[in-house]
Image (cartoon, rainbow, N blue to C red):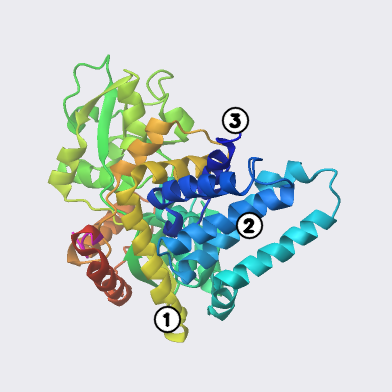
Amino acid sequence: MPEDVWPELKARAVCDQAVSPALARPLRDDIVATCGRVCRRRSRAPLGPSPGQQGLDLIVWIGGCCLFRGATFGQLSADFAALVSNFGVAYRPRYEGFGDQPMIKLIKALCMTLVVFGLAPTAMAKDWSLVRFSYSSGWDALPAIVAQERGFFAEQGLVVSGMPVSVAKAVAVSLGVGTTDLAAIPQETLLTILGAKVPVTVVSMGGCCVPMELVVPVSDTQTTSLTNLKGKAIGISEASPAYPVLIRLLNRARMRPSDVQIKFLPAARLTQAFKQKFADAVFDTQHFTATLTETKQGRVVTAAETVAKELGNIDAMPLVVRTELIAKEPDVVQKFVNAWIRAQVYIRQDPVDAAKLLQIFFHRQGITVADGLALSWVKMIKYDHYVWGKAEIADAEYNSWAIKTGGLAKTEVKLTGAVNNTFSERAFSQLEKESGANAGKAKP
């Protein structure tokens, strides 16, 4: 590789792993160019004569560029931790055979660099708070992923111990005994938790308005509405937010759940429902139905726009906190909600990067998601609503009625007293002052 190219590529690779917007791509490009120029001036070799000097040059000059461009000490403290960590990964092969002494010298040099830039005292003075956070293991985990991966929790002084979970009972038990402080969960899980009398409070929203549609096989030319499916099997994914919406659609069509056969299918089977004849129709979110229509297996009978217009369904995804934590540490809850809302603003501003983070999240679970598919999932959900208003509460209570009517719950749940919008309103107000119209909406 040409010597004058290597510094830019290495700086770009390290900067791409930065944890906060302090090293966002526009700034990163400036850093890369400056880093390359400085390093070439300092030595004829790509980044100095030794592995230690290579890494030291890189980190020192990236930090210097950040400071020169106006990034704050508070922002950079988290970024330097990431840079040092990434440096270790990027350069580990270069240290083989050098022994311990070069690494010891490098660590000392890095400490001196932090002191010179004034970052070490800032990091030490920051008042960090530990928060144990549970969230979905599916596509609706995106705000949680972004808040962690892009440093919004760190900017608020929060050390977040995150845990993706898929079992509603596990979340309910954890919140009840206090091993989880906050949780971002599907609405159906919230209704289950409230039905179990777990003392939690809804403090914000993690997206809403997921599009859902009814699809039948392309070979079925007779079906034009839900009423034509009486006595037939309708497939739906396991634990799908579409289930209560389907019950509501049946009710609107003057049909009962027993008039059709509702089949819960794993995701892999749902997307093969027509080829393998698992079901006569599929009603679910577009995360699944889009696969059926794009592969020419199915056609849309009831479009997502029609479902939303007829039912007014919102399907707000709740962020909940142990009610006890609000009384004991309201400042921690506020910081968390601040980061939570800022993460959703970031998703809207950079959906491509959000999609990449979602891909990585699924890949770590052994699931490969294509670039275009991940981006389409990001764009399906609205991330500009934060507060639970009357419409969101009424919609959730209607879903509770539907779940009970469908036989999946014994009682209906009311959200009276379970919602506290104070934290979201305060976070939104602060963000609105900073970002203006780009902040989104406090509520739909």
Task: Considering the whole magenta stretch, tell me its main secondary structure.
Answer: loop
Q: Identify the residue at image location x=31%, y=63%.
A: 412
Disc 1 from disc 2: Cα separation: 30 Å
| Residue under numbered circle 2 | 84
Q: Secondary structure at mark 1?
A: helix
Q: Which contiguous range is marked in magenta?
A: 439-444
Residue 49 in magenta?
Answer: no
Q: Residues within 10 Å of mark 1 (few under 14, many from 20)?
A: some
Q: Please tell me which of labels 3 and 1 falls first in the chain.
A: 3
Q: Position of residue 377 (x, y in %)?
A: 35, 40
83 left or right of 210 in image: right
Disc 3 from disc 2: Cα separation: 25 Å
Name the mark on residue 2: 3
Looking at numbered disc 1 in the image, what kind of residue is underneath it? Asp
Residue 79 appears in the figure: yes
| Residue under numbered circle 1 | 331
Disc 3 from disc 1: Cα separation: 52 Å
Residue 443 in magenta?
Answer: yes
Q: Residues within 10 Å of mark 3 (few under 14, many from 20)?
A: few
Q: Is residue 431 above or below residue 212?
A: below
Q: Position of residue 219 (x, y in %)?
A: 27, 14
Residue 170 appears in the figure: no
Closer to us: mark 3 or mark 2?
3
Report the number of numbered marks: 3
Q: Secondary structure at mark 2?
A: helix
Looking at numbered disc 3 in the image, what kind of residue is underneath it? Pro
Name the mark on residue 141: none
The answer to which image quadrant residue 125 occupies is bottom right
